[in-house]
Amino acid sequence: MHATRIVAIRHGETAWNVDTRIQGHLDIPLNDTGLWQAARVAQALAGEPIAAIYTSDLQRAHTTAQAVARTTGAPLTAEPGLRERSFGHFQGRTFAEIEAELPEDALRWRKRDPHYAPEGGESLVALRERIERTVATLAQRHVGEQVVMVAHGGVLDVLYRLATRQDIQAPRTWQLANAAINRLLWTEDGLTLIGWADTQHLEDHHNDHQPLRDEAHS
């Protein structure tokens, strides 16, 4: 079978994750917990054969990917196509602020309206098309190999939906934990889910799982 194994990782924690503040394309660094998580996921992958690492060019993902590159020796490439969804004028605001200031927008967002885009941002449909295209392009370079892709909550959410054939409007019931290990298989027929939300490498520290929310935003 002409397949590429993908290890998909959400970046480590940032201060804005803790504050439920929407990052989108804003370039927020990892906090101390996030740096620890990056080191732990890097150690967890140290013994695995990895042909290449691709990462969002935003520093919270790039720093996480650099840790994996150090332990595996795999080449690291920044790929803007793996960036988080652009949230336009939502960026920098908390959930509570959006609901208070822009209630109609907040409702369309909460309902996962697939064609709704915050002013200056991306719709869910546009995000899905971007991620599907980017992942296929990268995976095609590494048929028969394993690659790591480091990205964001919204990106990981799309990957899960693509791999499980779930509609973009379906409520999310799966975790998008910071620095969890998620495994997928890519073929020309699309993505298949192999394993999701492995956090064993993070369990000897305080629990840093992100709560389930209606929208990934980081």
Image: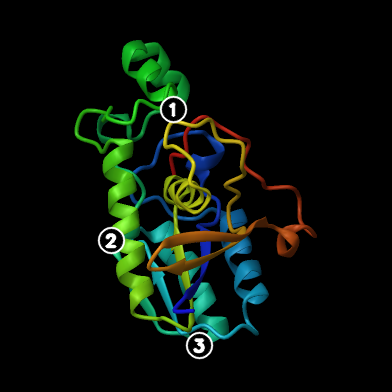
Front one among 169 and 73: 169
Residue occupied by mark 3: 73
N-terminal label among 2 and 1 = 2
Q: Residue at x 80, y 60 (%)?
A: 204
Q: Where 50 falls versus 30 (above or below)?
A: below
Q: Quadrant of residue 174?
A: top right
- C-alpha span from label 1 to label 3: 38 Å
Residue occupied by mark 2: 80
Q: Residues within 10 Å of mark 1 (few under 14, many from 20)?
A: some
N-terminal label among 2 and 3 = 3
Q: Tags 2 and 3 in contact by the CB under 8 Å rule? A: no
Q: Quadrant of the C terminus?
A: top left
Pick out the residue farthest to the right: 204
Q: Tags 1 and 3 in contact by the CB under 8 Å rule? A: no
Q: Position of residue 122 (x, y in %)?
A: 26, 38
Residue 25 visible here:
no
Find numbered disc 2 in the image and state the secondary structure of the residue it sits on: helix
The amino acid on which the numbered mark 1 sits, given as a three-letter code, is: Thr
Q: Position of residue 75 (x, y in %)?
A: 41, 84
Find numbered disc 1 in the image and state the secondary structure of the residue it sits on: loop
27 displayed left or right of 35: left
Q: Where 113 falls versus 68 (above or below)?
A: above
Q: Residues within 10 Å of mark 2 (few under 14, many from 20)?
A: some
Q: Quadrant of residue 103?
A: top left
Q: Tags 2 and 1 in contact by the CB under 8 Å rule? A: no
Q: Position of residue 133 (x, y in %)?
A: 29, 59
Q: Which mark is residue 94?
A: 1
